[in-house]
Each structure stands twice: as C-alpha cells, then as structure tokens.
Image: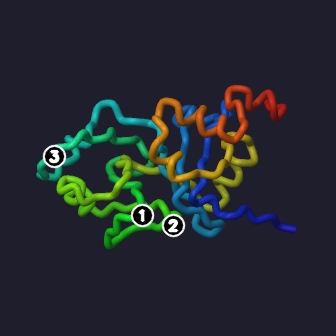
C-alpha cells in the first residue's frame, strides 16, 4: 500500500543536526507549496542577508525608499537568488499571489514595494531572495533520512520571532530540544 504525505504548505521544515547539506544548517523553511506531482517550494525565513538591504532593493528599482525603518532582506534559498519573493500578511491584496493559507500569501508583485513606501502595504512582510525547491519525491526522501523536522507554523511564528532564535524557539514551542534531536531519535 502506497503512503501519501499530506501537503506541507503552511508548515515549517526545520533542519535537524543530521542535515547533510551545510546550506541548510540551522535553517527554518516556511513551506509555500507541496504536491506529490509537482514537488515542493518554500522560503528560508531565518537567514537575514548581511550585504544587501531592502533600501538597496528600492534604489535598484528607482523607487524612493520609504521613511520607515526597513526590515532586512532574507536569503530564501539557494534557487533563483536573483528573484525577490514577498511573504506577507493576507489582509493586503495584490493581483498576483499564492495563498499559502488564510493568513499568509506569497507574491512577486512589485506593487508591494510602492505600497509599503506609501504606508499602504501589508501589516507584516518579509522580502526574500530566492527560494528552496524540491522535485517530485525529493522532499519525501529527505524527510525519510531525518534531515528535516516538520512542524506546524503559525502567523506569529513566521513574522514575529527574531531570526537568530527562530530555530530553537519554534522547536522548543513543540517540546523538542533540537540540539538533542539525533540522540532522542536514536540517530546520533
């Protein structure tokens, strides 16, 4: 009998200490889509980019930077790192978006930049460079090797936890000491 994994859209993938790919060490990925036929797509939400600012993004698009404190840009993943994705609260509506759940949308619509500058943008948002992607069956194979832990994500988890503590805080919220994960599961 074939077992089908439910969609992980709206969940977190938390890299365990057993994660073999160093690009994902201590990373938290918010899953945006996941189907057996098309694979999966998510964005890393706890890796601020040090050398590029959101103000620089405004400048590169010949837009005046808003007169507010701008949050950092985040490295969304190793795929298509020239592409800008905006993870945002769903009360804000744009013409093109992916509804991850009733609270969170993902978009690439540059109108969001204009609206943020005019203080008409989404209440919460994260700008991400690139994304993390898996072909059909690839993520399921990685999950079977204990490289990832899947946990439910809440709106507050996505937008209000500081990136430097997100990996530990989300797992602790679910009663998991992520540093001991391999020892607890017997995969040390």
Q: Which of marks 3 and 1 is in front?
A: 1
Vertical placement of 2 versus 125: above or below? below
Q: How crowded is mark 2: few (under 14 residues within 10 Å), some or many (20 or more)?
A: few
Q: Where is residue 165 in the image (x, y as percent from the top left)?
A: 52, 31
Question: Residue 140, percent across and down?
Answer: 69, 54
Q: Nearer the viewer's eye, disc 3 or disc 2?
A: 2
> Closer to the camera, 80 or 185?
185
Q: Tag 1, which secondary structure?
A: loop
Q: Quadrant of the N terminus?
A: bottom right
Residue 38 image offset from top left, x and y in percent: 58, 67
Q: Residue at x 55, y 55 (%)?
A: 31
- Residue 65: numbered disc: 3
CA separation in Å, label 3 and label 2? 30 Å
Q: Name the residue under label 2.
A: 102
The image quadrant that residue 116 belongs to is bottom left
For disc 3, the neighbor class at 10 Å (few under 14, some 14 to 19, many from 20) is some
Q: Say which of 56 and 91 sits in front.
A: 91
Q: Which residue is drawn at 60% across and 54% down?
A: 11
Alpha carbon of mark 3 to alpha carbon of mark 1: how far? Answer: 23 Å
Residue 85 visible here = no
Measured Cα–Cα span from mark 1 to mark 2: 7 Å
Label 2: state its secondary structure: loop
Report the front residue among 70 and 49: 70
Mark 1, residue position? 90
């Amino acid at each position: 009998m074939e077992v089908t994994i439910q969609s992980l859209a709206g969940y977190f993938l938390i890299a365990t200490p057993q994660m073999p790919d160093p690009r994902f060490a201590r990373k938290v990925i918010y899953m945006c889509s996941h189907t057996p036929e098309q694979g999966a797509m998510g964005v890393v939400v706890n890796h601020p980019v040090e050398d590029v600012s959101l103000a620089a993004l405004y400048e590169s698009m010949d837009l005046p930077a808003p007169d507010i404190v701008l949050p950092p840009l985040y490295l969304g993943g190793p795929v298509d790192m020239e592409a800008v994705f905006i993870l945002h609260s769903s009360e804000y509506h744009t013409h093109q978006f992916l509804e991850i759940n009733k609270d969170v949308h993902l978009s690439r619509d540059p109108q969001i930049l204009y609206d943020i500058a005019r203080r008409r943008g989404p209440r919460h948002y994260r700008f991400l460079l690139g994304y993390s992607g898996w072909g059909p069956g690839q993520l399921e194979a990685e999950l079977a090797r204990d490289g990832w832990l899947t946990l439910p994500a809440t709106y507050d988890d996505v937008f209000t936890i500081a990136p430097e503590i997100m990996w530990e805080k989300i797992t602790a919220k679910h009663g998991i000491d992520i540093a001991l994960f391999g020892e607890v599961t017997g995969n040390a």
